[in-house]
Image: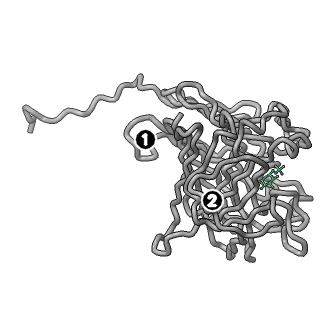
Amino acid sequence: MDRKNKPSAIPVSPFAPQPIVDLSDNVLTARLPSGDSVTVYLYGATVTSWKTANGTEQLFLSTAAALDGSKPIRGGIPLVFPVFGPPPQNHATSNLPQHGFARNNLWEFLGKSSSESLGSKADDSVKLDFGLSPANLDEATRKKWPYEFGLVYSVTLGKGKLGIQLHVQNKGDKSFDFQALFHTYLAVKDISKTAVSGLKSSPYVDKVRSAQTFTEDSSSLSFSGETDRVYTPPTDSKAEKPLVTLVVTEGGKESFVVTRDALPDVTVWNGWADKIKAMGDFEPKDGWKRYLCIEPGAVSSWTKLEAGDAWEGGAAYESKL
Ligand code: BG6
């Protein structure tokens, strides 16, 4: 039967702007129709640039960062796996370099999903997936950490937002212990006018004070010297996955909102003048004034992954600038 007032299909414009994704020379760039953009080096799957629609760079990248695969990239978002900091002695990670091997090996680009396939109505986000497995490591590194693992790292660019998610799979027949962390260098205008709220009452290990444990008594953490702390905020025991929000302010105005998904810890790091002076790949030398690392992770203890099991943790950065 031919209905007189039958509903017609909602017209979809074939010209609706789509995210543009380009991969050349192992560097991936993605741009949303809004103008938001992200750059990811396959080396380390390191995000080196995240710009919001007005073109403002949200991440700090050293002008002396090695971008040729000779060493981890200084700035952006290096990925830390399977050990955070210098590996402990007599441990399965003991022979690995500081912060592990994820940040200094070439990842594979697995593909992109646009808003439509992510269940959102508008074309306002794009998800980029990267993978790392023993097949991507050289023989020497495989020997240093002889486990069958699979990592999938997802970077989701949205309007004013960047989501990052790490999926770890144990594909072997023996369990392994790991730590993981997103070592995000946020760009700030002036570290002395920058503060972080959301950490009050949180225990933290202060690496600048002999790795002793303290409890944060300030509702607004400000910076006046080298800061290197691993916070483990208490979580609501009823919550299955802790979703904890931190707010970065600059001159009293909100600049970033950082949420953590199923990640118990967050490292807050600024090396300050002297430490940065000694870092050969950190330029300009006064650049310590213009970055703050807010590093969500699972690093205060080891996560044990049984054979065949998987783990996932993530974070999201929202720019308020
Ligand atoms: C931070 C650590 O996460 O990374 C600091 O807490 C360390 O102790 C910093 O100095 C930089 O590490 P790297 O290996 O990139 O020089």
Residue 190 lies, in percent from the top left, at 68, 35
Q: Residue at x 81, y 33 (%)?
A: 286
- Sequence-first tag of 2 and 1: 1
Q: Is the C-beta of the residue carrying label 2 under 8 Å from the nearest atom of ligand 1?
A: no
> In the image, what residue occupies the spot 86% across and 69% down?
88
Do the residues bearing badges 2 and 1 touch, measured as CB atoms within 8 Å?
Answer: no
Q: Which residue is mark 2?
A: 167
- The x, y position of residue 295, in whole percent, is 67, 53
Q: Is residue 201 above or below residue 53?
A: below
At x 82%, y 35%, the residue is: 67
Q: Residues within 10 Å of mark 1 (few under 14, many from 20)?
A: few
Mark 2 vs mark 1, CA separation in Å: 22 Å
| Residue located 84% across and 41% down the image | 273
Residue that carries the numbered disc 1 in the rendered image: 116
Quadrant of residue 256 within the rendered picture? top right
Nearer the observer: mark 2 or 1; the answer is 2
For the residue pair 163 and 207, the one nearer the viewer reads as 207
Three-letter amino acid code at the position of disc 1: Glu
Q: Position of residue 291 (x, y in %)?
A: 71, 40
Q: Amino acid at mark 2?
A: His
Q: Is residue 280 left or right of residue 241?
A: right
Quadrant of residue 65 within the rendered picture: top right
Image quarter of the N terminus: top left
